[in-house]
Image (cartoon, rainbow, N blue to C red):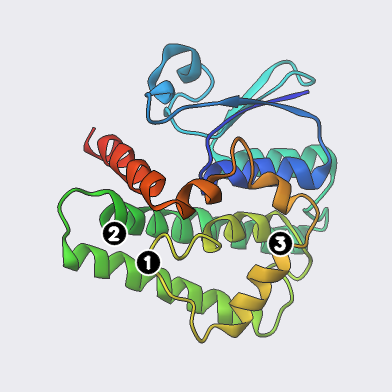
Amino acid sequence: MIELYTSPTPNGHKVSCTLEAMGLTYNVHTINLMNGDQHKSNFLKISPNGRIPAIIDKSNKNLHIFESGAIMIYLAEKTGQLISNDSLKKAKVLEWLMFQMGGIGPMMGQANVFFRYFPEKIPAAIDRYQNECRRLFEVLDKHLSKHEWLAGEYSIADIANWCWVRTHKWSGVSIDGLENLDRWKNKMYEKPGMKEGIKVPVKIENLLKDKNKAAEFVKNSSKIVKK
């Protein structure tokens, strides 16, 4: 049994979507970031960096793992799913997973901070991160013009990148003209477990469609950014 500690964010969805795609049984423990649950001692024992997601694999000596990419790799190797045993194919999966971990995630995260959450609007910072997100999207689009999936075969690399790319509007980044990226993004919704995984622990889209609730979400998120 997997114990999942998470929140409704792209990084959280990376793991919940992976668990759903693999058909694994798991329990969800919601970490309320607004209330500071991530800083509490019981969670820090699982995730020393105070960030979600994290898991405990009770079937494997109560193994604790934090960092979404590390969790995805662990689950893929544990189940033999969504990653190849072939060293060359596996290298490509890890390559595009690291592309998300080192590029897509951090840049979109910073775009969110300066475009949505930071109390002072700094145009240069907003432009910097939104433009870099767009550049990274163009890298994906060019690659996907020759490949159906990022690593040749459908893998955890697709899940990781998709969980962030699908939120591009929240980051204020357009994907207009990126037809290959758009095709891939839409196709991902039809893959097993994706629609279910993005509802864990709550369906955030419903909240953000309500202008008042979205405004309250931004207000509360701004408090986290200030800390």
**Residue contact at pointers 3 and 1, CB within 8 angstroms:** no
Q: Earlier in the sequence, mark 2 or mark 3?
A: 2
Q: Amino acid at mark 2?
A: Phe
Element at label 3: loop
The residue labelled by disc 2 is: 115
Q: Quarter-wise, where is residue 23 in the image?
A: top right
**Residue contact at pointers 2 and 1, CB within 8 angstroms:** yes
| Most foreground residue, 48 or 94 | 48
The picture places residue 35, in percent across and down from the top left corner, at 38, 24
Image point (41%, 68%), residue name: 133
| Most foreground residue, 84 or 134 | 134
Image point (39%, 53%), residue name: 211
Left or right of 179 in this view: 22 = right
- In the displayed structure, 149 sits above or below 206; it is below
Real-space Cα separation, disc 2 to disc 3, in angstroms: 26 Å
Q: Earlier in the sequence, mark 3 or mark 1?
A: 1
| Most foreground residue, 140 or 183 | 183
The residue labelled by disc 1 is: 172
The residue labelled by disc 3 is: 189
Real-space Cα separation, disc 2 to disc 1, in angstroms: 7 Å
| Number of numbered discs on residues | 3
Q: Is the N terminus in the top left, top right, bottom left or bottom right quadrant?
A: top right
Q: Residues within 10 Å of mark 2 (few under 14, many from 20)?
A: many
The picture places residue 206, in percent across and down from the top left corner, at 54, 49
Image point (17%, 58%), residue name: 121
Q: Residue furthest top?
A: 42
